[in-house]
Image (cartoon, rainbow, N blue to C red):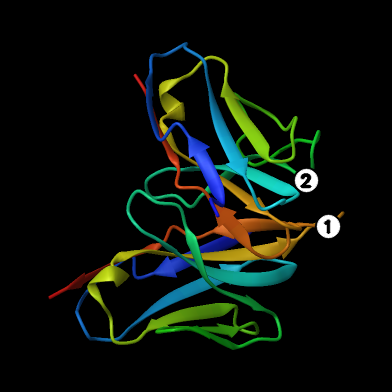
Amino acid sequence: KNQVEQSPQSLIILEGKNCTLQCNYTVSPFSNLRWYKQDTGRGPVSLTIMTFSENTKSNGRYTATLDADTKQSSLHITASQLSDSASYICVVSAMVTGGGNKLTFGTGTQLKVEL
Amino acid sequence: NAGVTQTPKFRVLKTGQSMTLLCAQDMNHEYMYWYRQDPGMGLRLIHYSVGEGTTAKGEVPDGYNVSRLKKQNFLLGLESAAPSQTSVYFCASSYDGSYGYTFGSGTRLTVV
């Protein structure tokens, strides 16, 4: 069964500090791994998408890493801001017969940035 | 530049009532999806469509029906709402189903 596990479940950090969120997965056949940011009351917004051959991808202060051998990914947030307070969701995509992908969603890490 | 628009944003239904959730996208995407998000669980796929006139079941299709009569619209219907269908519903679209997904802002549905 395809699974995506994220840790920690929740995290509180002070503004300006860095943090790293973890994602472990058992999804096959692997197609790509995505990190989404979901603000309260909003839909998920894509931060990064990585394929098998990519092991690092950045989007501003967000840097995602992927180790396809150990099936682990991390999302590093640098110099956190209050607006980073959100749920961060790891999503792993598996290829399906006939085209398209099947997404497996993690339950998210709830990040709160405080003054 | 609307992206994916969902209506309504909030709704309260009584058990047994029916309703339709509308999803509209203006990006000419082929693939459209309906997900539900419940506390402590990842988003789960209800139904999806790979093009106008097509629909297919996802992980949790029971109690829901869908239609894709026009490429830009994907409708999710609840024929007889149950309290277990209380959830936040998200629509998403994708150009080819393999890469970027764009999500709507969600519909919060409560069934009492």
Q: Tell me if A6 is positioned left or right of A50 in this view.
A: left
Q: Which mark is residue A99?
A: 1
- Viewer can see residue B53: yes
Q: Where, by quadrant of the figure, is residue A31 drawn? A: bottom right
Q: Residues within 10 Å of mark 2 (few under 14, many from 20)?
A: many
Amino acid type at image mark 2: Val
Mark carried by residue B50: 2
Q: Which quarter of the image is occupied by the N terminus of chain A?
A: bottom right
Residue at image location 48% in from the left, 62% down from the top = A45
Q: Nearer the viewer, mark 1 or mark 2?
A: 2
Q: Position of residue B12 (x, y in %)?
A: 36, 22
**Residue B16 relative to residue B94: left or right:** left
Judging depth in this view, the residue of A23 and A35 nearest the camera is A35
Chain on which label 1 sits: A
Relative depth, front residue between A34 and A9 = A34
Label 2 chain ID: B
**Looking at the image, which residue is at 64% across and 82% down?**
A68
Q: Residue furthest top?
A: B16
